[in-house]
């Protein structure tokens, strides 16, 4: 058995939503920052059904004044090898 990191998309979405609220931003504000025509992508991030691309993750980190590591929630999972 080996331990491997796995991104927890739901917990990551919760982090994004918490940081958005702490920054006093609405989903609409974030939509404008990213230049999205609709807010669906942001709602998908918040609900953990999709992850931001790496470049959007870097923008989120700058927007919230945190590191990418503070946004991404990682769980360790055991994987049987062989």
Image (spheres, rainbow, N blue to C red):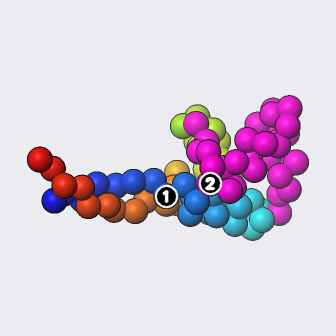
Q: Position of residue 58 (x, y in %)?
A: 58, 42
Callout 1–callout 2 Cβ contact below 8 Å: yes
The answer to whether residue 5 is visible is yes
Pointer 1 or 2: first along the chain: 1
Identify which residue is drawn at 85% across, 56% down: 26
Q: Which of 80/24 is in front? A: 80
Q: Is residue 47 magenta?
A: yes
Q: Position of residue 57 (x, y in %)?
A: 59, 43
Q: Which of 21/10 is in front? A: 10
Q: Check disc 2 and report the residue beneath it.
A: 48
Q: Answer with the quarter of the image where residue 17 lies.
A: bottom right
Q: Answer with the quarter of the image where residue 33 lies.
A: top right
Q: Is residue 39 magenta?
A: yes
The answer to whether residue 19 is visible is no
Identify which residue is drawn at 69% across, 55% down: 46
Would you call the spot at circle 2 few (<14 residues within 10 Å), some (14-19), or many (20 or more)?
some
Q: Secondary structure at mark 2?
A: loop
Q: Check disc 1 and report the residue beneath it.
A: 8
Q: What's the magenta region?
A: 24-53
């Amino acid at each position: 058995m080996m331990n491997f990191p796995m991104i927890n998309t739901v917990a990551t979405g919760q982090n994004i939503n918490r940081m958005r609220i702490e920054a006093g931003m609405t989903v609409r504000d974030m939509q404008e920052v990213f230049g999205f025509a609709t807010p669906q992508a942001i709602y998908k991030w918040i609900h953990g059904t999709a992850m931001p691309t790496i470049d959007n993750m870097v923008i989120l980190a700058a927007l919230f004044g945190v590191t990418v590591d503070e946004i991404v929630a990682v769980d360790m999972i055991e994987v049987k090898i062989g």
